[in-house]
Image: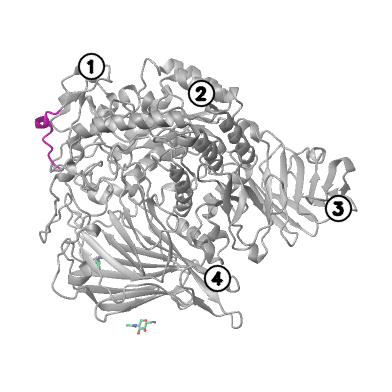
Amino acid sequence: MARSMLQAVSTAVFGLSAISLPLANAAAVSSTATSARSQYTLPASVQYAENVIPNINDPQAVDAQSVCPGYKATNVQNSTFGLTATLSLAGTPCNLYGTDIDTLNLTVQYQTADRLSVNIVPTYVDSSNYTQYLVRDSLLAKPALDEGVSETSKFHDLSFSWSNDPTFAFTVQRRSTGDVLFTTEGSKLIFENQFLEFTSPLPDDYNIYGLGEHIHEFRLGNNFTATIFPADIANPIDYNIYGSHPFYLETRYFEVDPKTGNTSITTGNATDPSKKYESYSHGVYLRNTHAHEVLLRPNRITWRTLGGSIDLYFYAGPTQPAVTKALLKSNDALPAMQQYYTLGYQQCRWGYKGWSDVEDVASNFSKFEIPLETLWVDIDYLGQLRDFQTDPNTWSIEEGEKFLSSLHSKGQHFVPIIDSAIYIPNPDNASDAYAPFDRGNEVGAFLKNPDGSLYIGAVWPGFTVFPDWLSEGAQTWWVDEITAFHEKVSFDGIWIDMSEISSFCAGSCGSGNLHLQPVHPPFALPGEPGAVVYDYPEGFNITNATEAASASSGAASQSSAASVSATTPASTPIYRPTVTPGVRDVNHPAYVINNGQGDIANKAISPNATHIDGTQEYEMHNVWGYQILNATHNALLNIFPEKRPFIIGRSTFFGSGRWAGHWGGDNYSKWGSMYMSISQALSFSLFGIPMFGVDTCGFLGNSDEELCNRWMQLSAFFPFYRNHNTLSTIPQEPYRWGSVIESTKTAMKIRYPLLPYMYTLLHLAHSTGSTVLRALSWEFPNDPLLANVDTQLLLGPSILVIPVLEPQVSTVQGVFPGIAEGEKWYDWYTQTPVSATAGKNETIDAPLGHIPVYVRGGSVLPQQEYALTTRDARNTPYSLITALSAKGTAKGELYVDDGESVKPNATLFVEYAAENNTLTAVPQGAYVEPQPLANITVLGVPSAPLAGVTFNGVKLPSSSVAYNGTSHVLSVTGLKNYTAAGAWAHKWTLKW
Ligand SMILES: *[C@@H]1O[C@H](CO)[C@@H](O)[C@H](O)[C@H]1NC(C)=O
Ligand SMILES: *[C@@H]1O[C@H](CO)[C@@H](O)[C@H](O)[C@H]1NC(C)=O
């Protein structure tokens, strides 16, 4: 949860310094009516530091390229694996957004056959005062040189070249095509202590993906600034949100000359169906933890960071899977394997008031016979909103113990939220004791101000401190607190929130003000006076006209009441930070990034919050959320040494996937949020976080039947499948509306049978770096028309989903990829081939309650049966769907293990292949799967098997075989007797 009350506040306000907030003087402390105890509400002014204007929007901003001198390379030396050089400033320092650094070291390495690194660091780095922070390898894995590949430059598909005319520039080219992938020719390298810039031209209408985390179309386009700076902000379009993923994938399409086979780059994605195309993809990763910005402009990309170094990695691909696999492997970023149960359905909301509420929810799921795997609780359960304690009245330990043991006995699970900030008690109030703070403080677990005092911000419970993950004390304290809490509340996984890291005030606003504790956040919570939620999805005014009218008049009167008292922060003067050469100003970097919250101190802890080793949030902010996931992973391993930790975290950095999954944050009960969930998921596939899903039916605002109906169906195809909403809105569990119960079951009757396939995809992602949710352009790389598609998605290689993403319609437009190359698609429900035209948007019937799903010809899909929990589903017989390609072939695979062990002592891998009317299954591995095989369904069998059907040479009785001459579906049943030792105990063959 954790909503941001601020919308995109680039217009923010209040000329208070981030360092010392005159809070006591602000005296605007007031008490709220909603709390039982009288509680001070922080004044709204604490939320803001400076009113700044982002550099990209500032007409007065100077372009560094026009005034800075660039560098000259000297002392260039070839080495076995690349080259080294010294770069010296080529003129008078410009000191534009920082202090120019005189000399730099350039190191270029051909690290493997498909990876090139370009590293530029200051020659002299004073490690004692961190004026130029170089990311520690212990913090973030660093792709290493593979010395086994000798002199890879000769065999490498990427080539590096450089020039000194007029100043130093470098170029990375793909040898096989001669294509320039990246070149700084014609521009200058800018390297200042608080500002780095390098820029390259790009082809017309280029296809770039990644650069998270944002709510934006999947293909980023050429008019977008990707700000990379974690922010607690409710999913605004195009602004920076929770995570940092400084990586992009670029795909270039080439026209193939049919006579010569030569290729030439296409302009844009316009295609001519009579022509043939092919694509090459490459990846670029900048290993830098500072706030930064990537400017995508027509024909150009520009990277700007607020410090650190240029630690760039080029991945040759030449396909998306090749790029992603190499990227994830080389950065130790292969995603965590999840427990099987985490693929079951999960229910949450902010507003469950006690164990009795969640008990009701669980029993409603069972009453309506809707699968429920895991119940989640938001901050409601926290005693006084403080981590590691529950409210003794409604969330008592004893009642929880009873409920959770009954939940567990039904094969269900429980995941509570843990917030990132830690309450600091009121020193004047002896009864305000909070032991977790004391224990952490004793071991120096918390961030400090530059003067050594505790840095004190404000989050849900009031004034708070924040763990300093660089301190050994914080790591062990966190593990101990979570472990001790598990002894009271036996949770199964952990949800980490507010980890950007968020603070509701700018600066150490609690310093000197702790006697006010506990304080209320500086804004009204949803449902409190002035913040009553009247919002509904588009289309609600048609389906529920009367309620919509009353909601809109409520909203109107609330907003007119609010406008009387609202302050107008935009009227405060704009603050333009300046540079003093030689001085590093972390609070006011002169280059102002386009942060959705305005000043970088707003709604986050300030850049001068200081770590134990002297580093500051200025250089560490982007990885705070990454580190808490690491620490939480260790805590879960301490509690369950044998089980894979299940964590869903909000702030991530590239590589977080090795510890945790992610949800899409504070989205809205709006059709647009559902549409954007596809782009979000595909982006997180690129970032190595396949365990992804969004708040189904929407978090902020009220949901409605139509939206929830469609959304419960779409999310059923995402690995992480959870419904969640905010405080005070109408309930939106799927059993609240009759049609949603039905649509949910319809989709779950596809999802649950497909769990063996989904689990196999996760295993392959974990072991090879492949993806689970896929863009059409990744599976069909030779069709430029697919470059833009983000309204459809593929689950693995074989399942195509074409969801309805708008209200009040009963059809959807969708494209069937690969038709021109002979691809065959089968309708999931009818099991018959789709007749579609290559490259054409087909109109597909999709009345409410129906989600169009297709199986790709050429696939073998292992299935088990639908059940209300994954435990029960795993105890059902297997079946196989074999969807033959146009050539009559198919293949597939299955991975099975115990579903939970970190290191399973046995595993099973089955490969399926069909050709010439024969399907074989070849198992490998020692894991014993006792479930038999019940049925095999073969789609696309042209004619009846006249000679009958045999299983391992034994002719099956005619009662076991049915062939439908109209649908061309062959159904083989009754196989249990032949596979009583287990479906995959032995190799078998089916012939028809
Ligand atoms: C380094 O290698 C490049 C390319 O192989 C070559 O052109 C250049 O002359 C070499 N420079 C030195 C100093 O050996
Ligand atoms: C840069 O190169 C010089 C010369 O090889 C070396 O002494 C120095 O330590 C290098 N600086 C960094 C930050 O690696």
Type of amino acid under label 3: Ala
Q: Earlier in the sequence, mark 2 or mark 1?
A: 2
Q: Earlier in the sequence, mark 4 or mark 1?
A: 4
Q: CA distance from mark 4 to mark 2?
A: 52 Å
Q: Quadrant of residue 109?
A: bottom left
Q: CA distance from mark 2 to mark 1?
A: 35 Å
The image shows residue 148, relative to residue 56, as above or below, that is below
Q: Residue at x 63, y 37 (%)?
A: 746
**Cβ–Cβ below 8 Å for labels 3 and 4?**
no
Q: CA distance from mark 4 to mark 1?
A: 70 Å
Q: CA distance from mark 3 to mark 2?
A: 50 Å
Type of amino acid under label 1: Ser
| Residue 586 visible, this angle | yes
Q: CA distance from mark 3 to mark 4?
A: 39 Å
Part of the protein shown in magenta = 19-28
Which disc is residue 431 wearing?
1
Which disc is residue 361 wearing?
2
Given residues 411 and 201, the one toward you in this image is 201
Which disc is residue 944 wearing?
3
Q: Please tell me how crowded label 2 is: few (under 14), some (14-19), or many (20+) other residues with Cα within 10 Å.
A: some
Q: Please tell me how crowded label 4 is: few (under 14), some (14-19), or many (20+) other residues with Cα within 10 Å.
A: some
Q: Which residue is mark 4?
A: 278
Q: Please tell me how crowded label 3 is: few (under 14), some (14-19), or many (20+) other residues with Cα within 10 Å.
A: some
Examine the residues drawn in magenta and state their main secondary structure. Answer: loop
Some atom of ligand 1 lies within 8 Å of the CB belonging to the residue at label 4? no
Q: Earlier in the sequence, mark 3 or mark 1?
A: 1
Given residues 88 and 955, the one toward you in this image is 955
